Amino acid sequence: MAEGRITKRTVDALNTTGREYVHWDGELTGFGVRVRATGSKSYIAVYRTGGRNAPQRRVTIGAVGKIETDKAREEAKTIIREAELGHDRAAERARARKEMNVAQLCDLYLEEGCDTKQPSTIATDRGRVERHIKPLLGKKRVSELRRADVEKFLRDVAAGKTAVDIKTGSRGRAIVEGGKGTASRTVGLLGGIMSFAVSRDMRGDNPVRGVKRYPDKKGETFLSSADLARLGDAMERLEKEGANPSALAIIRLLALTGARKSEIATLKWSEVDLERGYLRLATSKTGAKVLPLGAPACQVLAEVPRLDDSIYVFPASTGTRHFQGTERVWAKIKQAAGFPNLRLHDLRHSFASVGLARGDALPVIGAILGHKDVKTTDRYAHLADDPVKQAADGISDAVNAALGGARGGTVVRLKVQ
């Protein structure tokens, strides 16, 4: 479609339609804005070299938000003008990319290959790239990477070859661990990066394909009712000792909702609907979603003091950001409860476990958790809100009772991502 000159206002008004399309400029032929099905937007230029019968070439100028509209227009003019003189910018880029090393490919992937990923996932990917992939494989040419190199990389990361403990700033530390789980997940990311390379014609095959990874034990810790009781006792003791109330409230909400840490830690008051008992999250790992709240979770939120000068439910003590000290308090709680290796994310798995132990259907639990698996989504998409909300109430009540000192209970194993 083309409707006049593309401006910032035009770009901001473009909406996703569930499929990719291009909005063309009405003045400069060949200049447009590509809108992907995910909603991400980028400026592009299309041209031909060698006459009307020559194949059409397309060049991505830059992502919307990273380059101004007027600058993108000028760059498009340059690309199209050069094409009239026989200069093929797309072919030039393709040649340069074929000579890229793995480090350069990773940078390109993080810039152009993560349109469908959430910021938190991209941050995790960036950490794995910088701490593991670049140090061991960064200098190798993309075209030269072989399956044997990937297999050696897997073994090296598992053996701790990239493990490091370094100082970051005046007080910070970056602790990078190896291990089989880290190795397997990083090779999984490398596979995605190499698929991106194949899609950009930088090589014809993916060297990660067929590499056998270590079994990833991530997500297999579940707490019984007795375990939850020990956790609740530890939280009560820490509360009496003056532990940060925001951290305690965040941890309790994670246990009572099955939400991800980022969803609660960054929660805004505008996303809280206590009247109906929902969190209406603008973004999450799987995109925007509605999270039903049980009565105990609503009670926790109702007791959180609201600060007029902050948009966050749990603001930082200084500045305008959200509270970020939950992990420090959690470290004390899990030690006091006798679970030194327990992760905050394990509360999410335990929430699902309690639901299954109650007899709640897997599709309903998947709806509460906002599970992104397509097959699971297909199975629960037809459900009304009522059974989902009722299950959320029941599971939250059961977890709350356990945290308050209930003993015994059945552990039902369920993997949740």
Image (cartoon, helix red, strand yellow):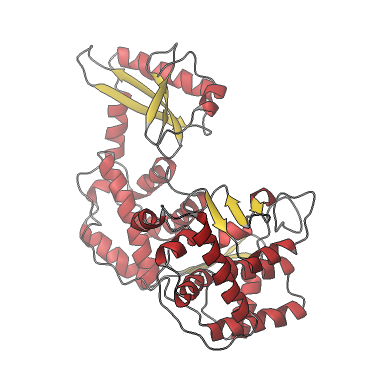
Seen at 44% across and 31% down, the residue is 42
Seen at 37% across and 17% down, the residue is 30
* Residue 329 percent across, percent down from the top left: 66, 73
Residue 397 position (above or below residue 66): below
Residue closer to the observer: 53 or 149: 53
Residue closer to the observer: 417 or 195: 417
* Residue 237 percent across, percent down from the top left: 71, 83
Residue 136 position (above or below residue 110): below
Residue 258 visible to an observer of this rendering: no
Seen at 35% across and 45% down, the residue is 105
Instruction: Tell me if 6 is positioned left or right of 234 in this view.
Output: left
Query: Which residue is outermost to the right?
Result: 308
Count of all numbered marks drawn on residues in the image: 0
Q: Quadrant of residue 55?
A: top left
Quarter holding the N terminus is top left
* Residue 306 percent across, percent down from the top left: 77, 56
Residue 26 visible to an observer of this rendering: yes
* Residue 118 percent across, percent down from the top left: 48, 49
Quarter holding the C terminus is bottom left
Query: Which residue is outermost to the bottom?
Result: 408
Q: Quadrant of residue 32?
A: top left
Residue 377 position (above or below residue 98): below
Instruction: Tell me if 297 is positioned left or right of 68 in this view.
Output: right
Residue closer to the observer: 198 or 143: 198
